[in-house]
Image (cartoon, helix red, strand yellow):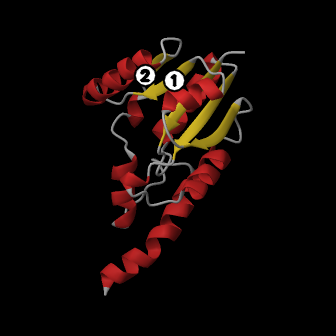
Amino acid sequence: MRIAIYPGSFDPLTNGHLDVAQRAAKLFDRVIVAIAENDSKHPLFTLAERVALVKKATAHLPNVQTDSFDGLLVNYVAERKAKAIVRGLRAVSDFEFEFQLALMNRKLDENIETIFMMPKDTYTFLSSRIVKEIARLGGDIRSFVPPNVQSALIKKLKPQRQKGAK
């Protein structure tokens, strides 16, 4: 079975992330969207919330699972018996950082390959950070995130927007 891990913080999952997961699902027997705990990024959503949001957004993909991990990615990949890491690349600026990570992961475990995938061109400008900022300012994010993520963002940010309005 060809298993791939699609890691990230997914805070929140965007349509760009979802596009990469859908296309990876066509290439691999199983894709595990692995959500990194990484509290140093100060996520808006808790790990449990991010897992639930990704699980619901990918429910239509029968060979996509959602999980979380903490620690070294290569250890998690080996533990899940995967052979590939899927990484999304939006622009050239992403490549340098992702290339460094891929080389480091290869050095740590030469049996794990990194596959770079670009989202559809309509999503290349998207980032979780930008989506959160648009939502925080009351902008329309319908075309940037799955419906369940949109609802969760609005609910999560509503108290913040009300405080800012006073």
Which picture quadrant has residue 106?
Answer: top left
- Residue at left 66%, top 28%? 80
Q: What whole-number distance in Å separates the C-alpha atoms at marks 1 and 2?
A: 9 Å
From this view, report whether residue 112 is shown above or below residue 43.
above
Q: Is residue 118 left or right of residue 27?
A: left
Instruction: Tell me the quarter of the image containing the C terminus.
Output: bottom left
Which picture quadrant has residue 139?
Answer: bottom left
Pointer 1 residue:
85
Which dot marks residue 105?
2
Instruction: Tell me the quarter of the image containing the N terminus.
Output: top right
Element on which disc 1 rests: strand
From this view, report whether residue 160 is shown above or below residue 102.
below
The x and y percentages for residue 65 are 68, 36
From this view, report whether residue 65 is shown above or below residue 74.
below
Of the pair 98 and 112, the residue shown nearer to us: 112
Q: What is the crowding at mark 1: few (fewer than 14 residues within 10 Å), some, or many (at least 20)?
A: many
